[in-house]
Amino acid sequence: MALVSEFLGQLTLSYGGEVEPTFPTVVAARDFDPAKDAARIETAIKTKGVDEQTITDILTRRKDDLITALKGALSGSLEALMLGLMKSTAQYDASELKASMKGLGTDEETLIEIVCSRNNEELAEIKKVYKEMFKKELEKDVAGDTSGDFAKLLLALVQTKRDEPSNVVDYEKIDEDARCLYEAGVKRKGTDVATWISIMAQRSVPHLQKVFQRYKSYSPYDMKESIRKEVKGDLEKSFLTLVECFENRQLYFANRLSDAMKSKGAKEKVLTRIIVSRCEVDLMKIRTEFKKQHKRSLYQTIAEHTKGDYQKALLSLCGGDD
C-alpha cells in the first residue's frame, strides 16, 4: 500500500457547508474523475481475494455509492474507517449517535463524547441530518435511551440554546455564574444539578472560560475537582467532558486518543471515531496538542498501537509526523 499516503493527501469528502474548516488534515482532491474511480473500485472488489489496496487508496480520498459492495469486501476496523469516510462529518456523527442508542443498552461513552464536545453549529447540523437519515428526532432518541440528570444534561445540550460569543465581557454575569456554580455544589450539602446544567448548557464558551477562572475565588477546588466531588457516573463524565472542551477542545481529543492507545493494542472504535470525525475539522491542531501534552507525535503513537492496512489508512489521515 505504498500509494496510500499519496492518495490520502488528496482526500476529498463532502463538507457540511461552504466554509472550509480551519485545521483539517484532509483537503479537497484535484482532477476528480468519479467514473474512473468507480471502475477501479469495482475491479478491486471482483478481484480474487479482494484488492484492499486499491479500495483503500481511492476511498480514503473519494466518496461514491458503493457502500453495499464494500461491506461485502472489507471487514473489521478497516471497513468501519472506509465507510465512515464516505459520510459527511455530520452524517458520521449522526450515525455514531444512532448506533450508540441502538438495541439493548446504550453506549454512553460515544453519546457523551459527541454531544458534549460539539458546538451549537455542529449539533444543529447533526440534528438536521439525523432526522433526514433516520426519520426521528435526536432529542426523542436521547430521551428514550437515557434517564435522570444525565438525560437532562444531554437534552439541554442537544437543544442548542448556548449563547453566541459576545465582544462585550459581562464581568457581573461572570461573577454571578461562578458564585451560583459554587453555591449549587461545593458550598451546600447535595448538588443543585439543574443550576449546573443551566449554566453549562446555555452560556457561551468564552464566558464559561472566565467563569471557571472566577470560580476559583469562591471554591477551594477548581471546576473539575468540584465535579468529581459532587457527581458520579455518566453525569460526572459528561460535565468533565464539557469543561475540558470549554478549556481546550483539541486537547480533549488528544487525550482521548492517548487513552485509546495506552494498552498494548488500541481501542480501535474510539480511534476510528475521532480520526474520521475530526480529520476535516481540526485534526492538525489535535496533533499539535497531542505532541505538546504527551511528548511524542500522534503519528508515532498510532504506528506503535495499530497494524496492517488499518494502520496505514490512519497514518495517512493523520497527515504526517510532527
Image: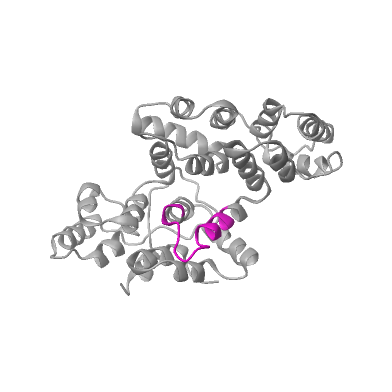
Q: Is 191 above or below relative to 223? A: above
Q: Is 16 above or below relative to 140? A: below
Instruction: Tell me the residue at 25%/48% (across/down).
Output: 67
The reply, left or right, for residue 121 in relation to residue 7 is: right
On-image quarter of the C terminus? bottom right
Residue 46 position, x and y percent, is 13, 60
Count up the numbered dots.
0
Instruction: Tell me the residue at 40%/44% (across/down).
Output: 92
User: Is 286 covered by the magenta stretch?
Assistant: no
The reply, left or right, for residue 293 in relation to residue 87 is: right
User: Is 269 covered by the magenta stretch?
Assistant: yes
The reply, left or right, for residue 127 in relation to residue 259 is: left
Q: Is 144 above or below relative to 308? A: above
Q: Please provide the residue range marked out in magenta.
A: 253-270
Q: Is 238 above or below relative to 270? A: above
Main SS of the magenta part reads: helix
On-image quarter of the N terminus? bottom left
Residue 290 picture quarter: bottom right
The colouring scheme, among rainbow, by chain, secondary structure or one colour, is one colour
Residue 274 position, x and y percent, is 48, 53
